[in-house]
Image (cartoon, helix red, strand yellow):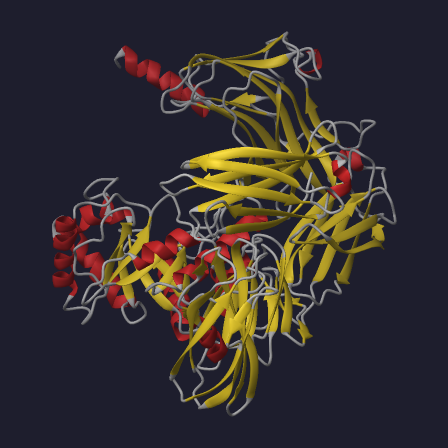
Amino acid sequence: MLPPQIVVSLLIVGVAAEVPKSPPALSVPLPPDLSIVYRCNFDESHDQNYDLFPDYWTRAYGPRYPLYVKAEIVPVASPDSPRSLWGYLDGGSLALSTPPISITQLFSYQAQVWVRTRNVQSDRIFLEVTLLDSNDKPLRLLSSRQLGETAEWTLLSVGPFDVDDPLVAKAVLTLHVEAGVRADVGAEVWFGTVSLRRLPMLRVTLDRPNGLYLLPQQPCVNCVVSGVPSPAPLLQIRVMNAEQQEVLQEKISLESQPAFSEEEIPPEPALRGITLYKGSAQRTLPLDQPGYYRIRVHLAQDSNSSRDAELAFVIMRPPEGNDLSPFGWSLPLGVLPPGPDRLRELLHHAAVGYVKFPVWCDDNTDKRTLQETSHFLEHLASHGVQIVGLLTPPDSVREKISPHATTLDVLSSDPKIWQPSLEFTFARVATLVRYWQLGEDDGEPLPSPARIQQVLDQAQKALGNVVAEIRLGIPWNWLRPFPPIRLAFVHLTGEPSLTAEELESFLQAIPKDPAPPQIFLTLRPLDDREYSLRDRVRDLVLRMAATREGAVLAAFHPDPFDPHTGLCTATGTPTELYLPWRTTANALASAQPIGSVLLPGGSTNRIFSIDQQRGVMVLWADRPAREVLYLGSEITAFDAWGKEVPVENTPQGQAILVGDWPLFVYGVSVPIARWRQRVTLATTRLPSVYGVPYRNQLRFQNTFPEPVSGEAFIATPPNWHVSPRHFTFQLQPGETLEREVFFTLPFDAETGPQPVRVDFRAQGESGYRFSSYHFVEVGLGDVYIEVSTRLDESGDLVVQQVFVNETEYPVSFRCELFAPDRRRQFMLIREQGPGRTVHQYRFPRGRELIGKTLWLRAEEIGGSRTLNYRITAAE
């Protein structure tokens, strides 16, 4: 006789194995609203045997789904029913399923359920749809988002989803409450009306599945519609660019035909006797500008059955060269999620020069995966992509030590555990892989340098007879001191990510070493949940440019398919950041940094040389600016999407409008850029004492590869006296000229930074006319005034003067404020010691002065300094 506990166990297993019989697949009689396929609101019509459980529904039984978890219909009102299905969670999971429901490829479907909970801590509630064939074999699972505690009624949805597989004949809706690691006890959940709706099927596809187009290619969109009652359904097509501006709109009337012939019998009884239509249309979108686009297709029906579909695509300029960039992608999941074919195309167009890929395998790895990996890596290597093999042990190796063992744990263990599989890996792909990284970029905690060195030595020794040279490296948190380890490379990673400015400073501060390792680093874009697209694009472009300023071999996106920071979606279509990445990678592929120059409009820039004569400038500004200067003989400019930006030719040079979207300016003359960088003034600050000549020295160098002769002219603010203002020069290549000049300030010279321009006319093998731009600070900066304006409640213009004394002794000044057509006002500052003092001037009828220039002049009493400020009155 079996022990009692075994008998009980067998009884429970028997119940679990017994599935209650269900009726044939349901299809409700045709309701007034054709969209309803199935609806259960738990009223008496759905509980005809009064057992407080919906008719023909089933629940899962087993160890995870114990019988003591209650589920019954209760008189608790949900949003559209007086009753609901209640579950009392007492330490287990709950799964409640509808009977099979007939569906067809003619429609799209959407499943929904109302949910409310009480005292849920770790359990998760979600809706699942299982698609079945005619024999009830599961073919596909679809799930909603997961809910935790939700005190208010909340709607969970799955879909709309299409029935792509012709074998699909039925659907089952399952209400899930899955227990967490610590299952909730005493928690409750209520489910309101459960429904499955029909929707007209609208399927929109592009002729290129990845959505990648090279000019002059134009996207061709294919729209398929079915399950509509109208014989001439109307489609509205809108195309938006990355900034949500509409660039195209049109309407299409489809030519349709009945969905079923007279001989065909619709699979769902509810559809019999009703004429429904299907149709399709193709359109080539007349787009000829590079950019990121979204096509939105709207099927106009009644309010309950209209459909919308959206697809993203990019149009790209063909690259000017075939250079691969120093930017890479880390692919910790291998060719997943988009698959090898789509992934190859994405990598190719993104100018990716480096790829990190998991390569460690063993005899347990299926042959298809091995073959797919080999072919994929061979393709990359044949196109010049540098492959970094990620050495993350397969589960079959890891589990011999611990399910949670790290790569270093495995390599620190007995070589008999890991060496055979690693030798197997090296034998397969060693000729394709250039670098080998121990572990993923962000996946493992870092042990001590001594232990890392021990593991590296052990791996080198074990594999030395398989591969002659093994370039091993490790990921390393950039917040830690640089590792004192013999490495081929170090991948710097960690959170938080550094800004472009921080990254430049960090790379410059890396300790110099006689034989330094190569440096890789992580380049994760900003999260789209926290930052605007403008901020994300600018940050990405500037950080990519910053990596070229330091000794970085390659910068890697850690997960190009991340839903919030990625360059592509899981299906392999581009996100908004794909083109900015591509544009930057192409621009900087073979470029070398040469620094920046001061521009007349104050825009920030980074210049990179492509060869000895030509370069590219990355250009941006915090405020809109119009930069006018000579950059080179053939200048073109493009935005981050690859779209050409207007460049106006003026007598002073090219004029370019600059904003906070980065621009790429091609054709920049490298010799002229270097000449500008080498023009210096020995003194960039003059005392605010007027009528006295101050000695300075102008220095510049011939950066052209040939001798040049010419003349220089110094342009200053009005009424400044410069001696000499104009002089000639003759310089050999690399020769430097130093010229003494004197600056004399007029009595009304404005205090603060003042622009000084040096115009050059140089003649070598060609003639050149260009300028360099500088600022000279008037005033020593130890005594100055901050001025602001505002309108007060009475309409007076209030001018606030903050007098700042940063010297160690008291000062006295006589201040005068001049306003157009108003009497000047005076203020005496007597013996003000170190610190800040606030004074105010007031002008009646202040609005008359808005937009006009005010002049504040402060003369030192008992001294020689004079401070001048011109400000524009503002509200």
The x and y percentages for residue 197 are: 71, 32
Between 7 and 405, the residue placed more toward the observer is 405
Looking at the rendered image, the quarter that the C terminus falls into is: top right
Q: Quadrant of residue 795?
A: top right
Q: As drawn, which residue projects farthest toward the bottom?
A: 765
* Above or below: residue 410 compared with residue 551: above
Q: Is residue 102 in sight in this rendering?
A: no
Q: How many numbered discs?
A: 0
The x and y percentages for residue 261 are: 83, 49
At horizontal 48% and vertical 82% (from top left) the residue drawn is 613
The x and y percentages for residue 436 are: 27, 61
Q: In the image, 738: left or right of 642?
A: left
Between 355 and 188, the residue placed more toward the observer is 355
* Above or below: residue 126 compared with residue 853: above
At horizontal 57% and vertical 58% (from top left) the residue drawn is 747
The x and y percentages for residue 639 are: 60, 63
Q: Quadrant of residue 580?
A: bottom right
Between 50 and 186, the residue placed more toward the observer is 186
Between 249 and 306, the residue placed more toward the observer is 249
Q: As drawn, which residue projects farthest toward the front?
A: 862
Q: Is residue 154 in sight in this rendering?
A: yes
Looking at the rendered image, the quarter that the N terminus falls into is: top left
* Above or below: residue 723 compared with residue 442: below
